[in-house]
Image (cartoon, rainbow, N blue to C red):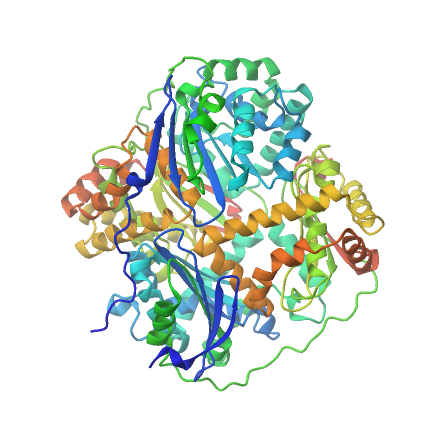
């Protein structure tokens, strides 16, 4: 086969997008010759939002089972995937999130064929055996327990569960414990056959590669895969409009309190996301940010973080704080709300906007310095629905006006649209008094 | 047979791309130009870490390092933050975790900001003024973090293990939280000024600059600004002798923590630069470097399904050799099984050693992984600093993969027997143990 089987979709800012005509596989090539290494990633457009009640955690469990191998790559043959990649010195892993599952490996350039071989093989050839599920289930349950040790994770899980009532962002990516304990191999195999298909995947290659050999690589290993059935369930659930503040508290063992506040915002590709990201930076990025000055510099909190989620479906604007010992949750709540409300009442200062923009420009420059970070950024773009969101970001952020920031804050960060969660420590000085 | 698609080609060795500058008084600067991205990274270390506290007040070096960003003769805390954030710069200064006698620092930004980066770094390292009000803020923050640490199973378990391994007064012994709180409460501004004046200086400064710097006259930009200062001191840390102790086990109950964190380990004696360094690292890799493929990972995670993660390693091989430890997370009901299995695997491995095929996998894994680690400017900068700090020649960076590939099974076995001893392993567990056993 030749490269003529690839259809060029678009070139933008040094990145080229192709589609393999016969099976629908998308391909992104991003040459950056910073060092003689390259990262190959595969992102499947399936995440925990594609799970249904009773099967939560299926996407993540399947990701674990994908390392158990194929007919060619498995322990019995001494070729288990992790060992083969490890031997190359690869930095590899896989992650599952709301909208996507991704697999990646960064390797010395001369070894780039091996991750391509493995990823192509397990795209349709994974064994997904019941005996592997039995062992991996307890590994995942231990991973779930580790999350329960972390107040932040506990709070995050509660915030999504309360903010989303209808939409499947409601349930945690790792799944509800009862579902993880009960899920059957047949369910995972069905999930695999539905979503792990070339036309539901994008191969991303970044690093010290030129376009032609990179496409040859994709053709050599992914070219033999047939097109999948093409039909798969499309999530159509939209979260209903929130019409009043929601609140919850988790009382657990611990020493420090945490607060999380979230507001519904549009999907990642919506034009309002750029001004919301700038608002998040003005609120919490660096020592001079508004919430840092009000909460951290005054000793009320140990840390603060705000961000605008960039997801396929409408997401959440998030503010998290860690309280200093002895500080009341309610006092800090009020300051967060006050600062957020102020953002919607007056335009930010010119210096604040300029600072947010230069920080973004620098972040993007550092992403180009690392093939792994480049693949990661493109993965999130694909998962949102358009990889170009990554390369367009510098222009979209640069074009944000002070009025845009005020408008989106007034529009979305309203009391009736927010959910507030408290992590209240049960032991330690606060609860003991 | 198909032709390989990718060839690394003839590339310049890193050592050939390094411009090394020695400064009068002892400081060193290594520069590597890389114009593929418009960024620069400065990373470095200087003497002033925890191990330099010769009076047992180990909190003083850490607070000194934290206070460097809190105000200088040129900048107030807020003015410094503004200068950094207005130009997209990231500055980090802290007591080094990997080199206990050192403070590590880094500053990253766009290449056009290099002169500003150097000027800020010099101001922060050379001319801190330790404002009283900022000291109070730092003190409160550290006390808050220590409070948080009481509930962190991993910190609690590891801290307890170090107290089982190292005597009072040893810099690698993590003191009880109450002791650390008392030390932090007692620190004065004068303590910090004294410590800074005594130890900080260009004489111990090792620094790497990597990025888009081809057109920059680095000795001129860095020279007097960053290197020409400080005490002409060459004091070395005094480290109490570690006497061999009987192994023990301590369980620490922390309510409402369903995952137990477990550390098994003993004191170590492996330093970067030792003749058997590569052999020992490779032998340990076969045992526990990877949670997916090493002996411990295969037995405890993959086959028994008892843990999400298990690893073993030498914790610190610069300046003061750290302990060798195995760490894992486990549910209370699986604790006993996991501990028995770990000890069986370790003992069996010590008895039989790695198979040639395992060792060969790890040789290649390390050699390739080393190359991957040098894929970013910050990766190259950190490796240069480590090499300079350990007193090795720069060529080591290019030579190291070959050294790894040349390690024989006999060398690995000897290193294994020398550096890992199952009979000396102590155990520390933290979490909600009420369901275990």
Q: Nearer the viewer, residue B436 or B269?
A: B269
Residue at 60% across, 18% down: B186
Res. A225 visible in picture: yes
Query: Can residue B319 be seen at all in this image of the molecule?
Result: no
Q: Seen from this angle, which residue lies furthest front?
A: B215
Give percent across and percent down for residue A163.
72, 62
Residue A334 point in image, percent of width and height: 81, 44
Location of the C terminus of chain A (image quadrant): top right
Position of residue A422 in the picture relative to residue A18 (left or right): right
Is B395 placed left or right of B376 in the picture?
left
Q: Quadrant of the N terminus of chain A?
A: bottom left
Q: Residue furthest right?
A: A345
- The answer to whether residue B319 is above or below residue B257 is above
Question: Against B176, is A280 above or below?
Answer: below
The image quadrant of residue B398 is top left
For the point 39% across and 27% down, the residue is B166
- Of residue A140 and residue B65, the one placed in the foreground of this image is B65
Name the spot of residue A247 as percent of width and height, x first: 77, 56
Observer-nearest of B267 and B34: B34
């Amino acid at each position: 086969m030749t490269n003529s089987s690839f259809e060029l979709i678009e070139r933008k800012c040094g990145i080229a997008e192709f589609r393999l005509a016969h099976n629908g596989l998308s391909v992104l090539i991003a040459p950056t010759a910073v060092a003689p290494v390259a990262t190959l990633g595969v992102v499947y457009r399936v995440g925990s939002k594609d799970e249904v009640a009773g099967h939560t955690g299926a996407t993540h469990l399947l990701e674990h089972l994908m390392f158990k191998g194929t007919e060619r790559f498995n322990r019995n043959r001494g070729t288990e995937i992790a060992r083969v990649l490890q031997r190359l010195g690869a930095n590899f892993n896989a992650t599952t999130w709301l909208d996507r599952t991704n697999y990646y490996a960064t390797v010395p350039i001369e070894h780039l064929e091996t991750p391509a071989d493995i990823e192509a093989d397990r795209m349709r050839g994974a064994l997904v055996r019941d005996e592997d599920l039995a062992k991996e289930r307890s590994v995942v349950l231990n991973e779930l327990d580790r999350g329960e040790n972390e107040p932040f994770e506990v709070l995050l899980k509660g915030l999504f569960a309360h903010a989303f009532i209808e939409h499947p962002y409601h349930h945690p990516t790792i799944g509800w414990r009862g579902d993880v304990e009960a899920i059957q191999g047949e369910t995972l195999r069905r999930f695999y056959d539905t979503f792990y298909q070339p036309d539901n995947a994008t191969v991303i290659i970044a690093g010290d590669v030129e376009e032609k050999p990179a496409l040859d690589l994709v053709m050599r290993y992914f070219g033999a895969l047939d097109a999948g059935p093409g039909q798969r369930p499309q999530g159509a659930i939209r979260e209903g409009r929130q019409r009043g503040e929601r609140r919850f508290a988790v009382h657990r063992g611990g020493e420090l309190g945490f607060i999380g506040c979230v507001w519904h915002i549009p999907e990642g590709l919506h034009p309002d996301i750029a001004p919301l990201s700038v608002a998040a930076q003005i609120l919490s990025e660096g020592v001079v940010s508004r919430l840092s000055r009000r909460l951290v510099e005054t000793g009320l909190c140990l840390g603060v973080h705000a961000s605008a989620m960039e997801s396929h479906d409408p997401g959440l604007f998030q503010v998290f704080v860690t309280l200093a010992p002895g500080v009341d949750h309610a006092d800090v709540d009020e300051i967060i709300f006050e600062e957020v409300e102020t953002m919607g009442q007056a335009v930010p200062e010119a210096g604040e906007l300029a600072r947010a923009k230069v920080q973004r420009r620098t972040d993007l420059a550092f992403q180009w310095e690392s093939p792994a970070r480049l693949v990661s950024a493109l993965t999130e773009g694909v998962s949102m629905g358009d990889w170009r969101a990554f390369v367009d970001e510098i222009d979209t952020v640069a074009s944000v006006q002070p009025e845009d920031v005020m408008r989106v804050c007034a529009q979305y960060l309203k009391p009736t649209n927010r959910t507030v969660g408290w992590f209240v420590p049960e032991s330690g000085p606060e609860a003991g008094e | 047979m198909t032709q390989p698609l990718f060839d690394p080609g003839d590339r310049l060795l890193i050592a050939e791309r390094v411009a090394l500058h020695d400064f009068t008084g002892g400081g060193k600067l290594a520069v590597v130009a890389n114009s593929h991205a418009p960024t620069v990274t400065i990373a470095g270390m200087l003497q002033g870490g925890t191990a330099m506290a010769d009076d047992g007040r180990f909190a003083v070096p850490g607070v000194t390092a934290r206070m460097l960003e809190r105000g200088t003769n040129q900048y107030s805390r807020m003015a410094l933050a503004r200068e950094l954030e207005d130009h997209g710069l990231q500055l980090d200064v802290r007591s080094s975790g990997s080199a206990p006698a050192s403070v590590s620092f880094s500053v990253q930004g766009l290449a056009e900001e290099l002169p500003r980066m150097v000027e800020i770094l010099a101001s922060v390292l050379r001319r801190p003024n330790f404002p009283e009000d900022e000291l109070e803020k730092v003190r409160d923050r550290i006390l808050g973090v220590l409070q948080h640490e009481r509930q962190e199973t991993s910190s609690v378990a590891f801290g307890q293990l170090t107290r089982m391994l190292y005597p009072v007064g040893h810099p690698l012994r993590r003191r009880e939280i109450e002791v650390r709180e008392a030390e932090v409460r007692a620190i004065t501004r004068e303590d910090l000024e004294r410590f800074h004046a005594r130890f900080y200086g260009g004489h111990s400064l090792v620094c790497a600059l990597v990025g888009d710097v081809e057109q920059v006259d680095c000795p001129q930009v860095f020279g007097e600004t960053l290197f020409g200062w400080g005490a002409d001191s060459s004091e070395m840390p005094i480290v109490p002798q570690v006497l061999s102790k009987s192994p023990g086990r301590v369980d620490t109950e922390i309510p409402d923590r369903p995952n137990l964190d477990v550390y098994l380990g003993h004191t170590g004696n492996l330093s970067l630069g030792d003749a058997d360094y590569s052999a020992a690292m490779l032998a340990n890799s076969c045992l526990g470097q990877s949670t997916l493929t090493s002996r411990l990972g295969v037995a405890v995670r993959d086959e028994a399904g008892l843990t999400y993660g298990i690893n073993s390693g030498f914790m610190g091989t610069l300046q003061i050799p750290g302990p060798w430890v195995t760490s894992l997370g486990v549910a209370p009901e699986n604790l006993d099984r996991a501990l028995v299995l770990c000890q069986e695997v370790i003992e069996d491995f010590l008895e039989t050693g790695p198979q040639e095929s395992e060792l060969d996998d790890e040789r290649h894994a390390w050699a390739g992984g080393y190359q991957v680690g040098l894929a970013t400017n910050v990766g190259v900068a950190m490796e240069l600093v480590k090499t300079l700090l350990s007193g090795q020649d720069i060529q080591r960076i290019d030579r190291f993969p070959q050294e790894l590939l040349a390690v024989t099974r006999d060398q690995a076995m000897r290193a294994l027997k020398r550096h890992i001893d199952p009979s000396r392993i102590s155990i520390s567990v933290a979490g909600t143990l009420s369901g275990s056993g």
